[in-house]
Amino acid sequence: MRSFYTRLVSKVLFPLHERLKGHTTVAIRREMERSQWLGIDEIRERQVERLRGLLIHCKVHVPYYRDVLSVLGLEPTDFQSPQDLQKLPFLTKPIIRENTDRLKADNAVGLARFNTGGSSGEPLIFFIGKERVSHDVAAKWRATRWWGVDIGDPEVVVWGSPIELGKQDHIKAIRDRMLRTTLIPAFEMSEAKLDGFVQEIIRLRPKMLFGYPSALAHIAEHAKKRGAPVDSLGIEVAFVTSERLYDHQKEIIEKGFGCRVANGYGGRDAGFIAHACRHGSMHITAEDIIVEIVDEGGAVLPPGQAGEIVVTHLATREFPFIRYRTGDVAVLDDHPCGCGRGLPVLKEIQGRTTDFVVAADGTVMHGLALIYVLRDLPGLRRFKIVQESLDLTRVLIEADPHMALTLTPTIIAGIKRRLGGSVRVEVERVDDIPKEASGKFRYIVSKVRSPVPSVGLRTNA
């Protein structure tokens, strides 16, 4: 049963906060909690209705899409099913960079500027309006409630985005205290910092955790090493997002904190795309998001086949994201979830296209094929694999000097078995493996351009 304070926050204080910001979050969340039980056919009918509304708005107010529709000779009434989206071109990061101003609706008010570095490190600048913020917050709120927790329950957020960390002003501090949210910066994970993080979590006794899976797993492992009792605090769930969730991380977090792990998938650019329910299914936020899976040539793939995720966000009239290529790879499921929700399911999220490696003979495989080589090696604290080219792969490892010397031949042999005997493997011992600029951690990065993988990838577990 939720506490009096949690009910006060979720029913009074947070709704007031959202209304003062001009957001319609509460009404949207309530409608989402009804619509999630609709059948898939009715959900798709609603998607098409909203898609036509979005395109009508774009034709009148968004210069870029006004030109696209005109050149292609299309009218919003030509879109009678989600499949009709294939009549439109893809939206890519280069297109957004070249047409940023022309993608803004001419009647948009109060747009907020955002950027994301992406895997290439080249910033993508885009804009988000209040409509989209309201829908994304509502979708996240709904998914939070699936797990028996709510806004206002004590929460520890392990995050590293400069956007969040750069806004620790007075107003935000008051809001976080009201919501009982405590931020732990994921940038620095030294022994001393980790000791402090563990003690802070014990002191706060949160109901939920939220953060990068790599960071939460790292804290859980440190707590175990210190004998700190973070598995008996009453934590209900750990929400993880923004990185691929590996099975071993899920196990570490669940055992370490004594809670369930709920995976979430989305991004600042693409929106809040999918979240796991208690049955483990990654439900797409289908009220707002249409997901297509495409191959390297852009052809739409049926459920069960892996390809790149393409997103159309229906609540982006101020700065439309229509058929946006995310660069992530996943598989759609065509089976309903046992929870009874009609929301479609992402069967598997395999990671970014840069999370796949290419062997010397051209075989494409998931980075797990290399991760498994290092994951359970004794004495290895952390690692990062960078495929620089077909001929060279570098491995950064955190280990004491003697252990690094012992492990190096094993690492080289294991990677050569997967990528090919002719590949040069360089192992470098470092004191600390740097994170991405956002605070995320990536186990594997490939700089080799590979085709969008197909189903049946090798991992050689």
Image (cartoon, rainbow, N blue to C red):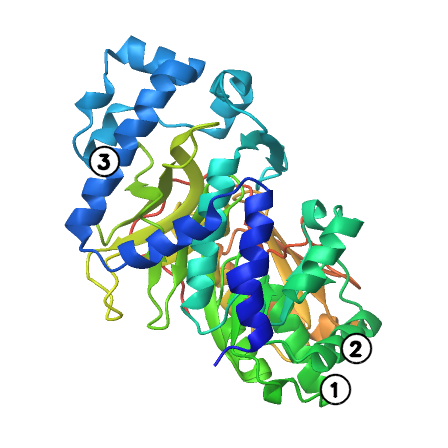
Indicate the position of residue 440 as horizontal and vertical percent values.
63, 55
Q: Do the CB atoms of the residues marked 1 and 3 lie less than 8 Å apart? A: no
Q: CA distance from mark 1 to mark 2?
A: 8 Å
Indicate the position of residue 38 as horizontal and vertical percent values.
21, 56
Numbered badge on residue 48: 3
Residue in the foreground of this view, choosing between 123 and 140: 140
Numbered badge on residue 195: 2
Residue positioned 56% across, 71% down in the render: 6
Q: Secondary structure at mark 3?
A: helix
Q: Do the CB atoms of the residues marked 1 and 2 lie less than 8 Å apart? A: yes
Q: Upstream in the sequence, badge 1 or badge 3?
A: 3
- The answer to whether residue 446 shows anywhere in this view is no
Q: Secondary structure at mark 1?
A: helix
Q: Upstream in the sequence, badge 2 or badge 3?
A: 3
Residue positioned 23% across, 58% down in the render: 342
Numbered badge on residue 226: 1
Residue in the foreground of this view, choosing between 301 and 323: 323
Q: CA distance from mark 2 to mark 3?
A: 51 Å
* Drawn side of residue 293 relative to residue 316, left or right: left
Q: Amino acid at mark 2?
A: Asp
Indicate the position of residue 162 as horizontal and vertical percent values.
71, 46
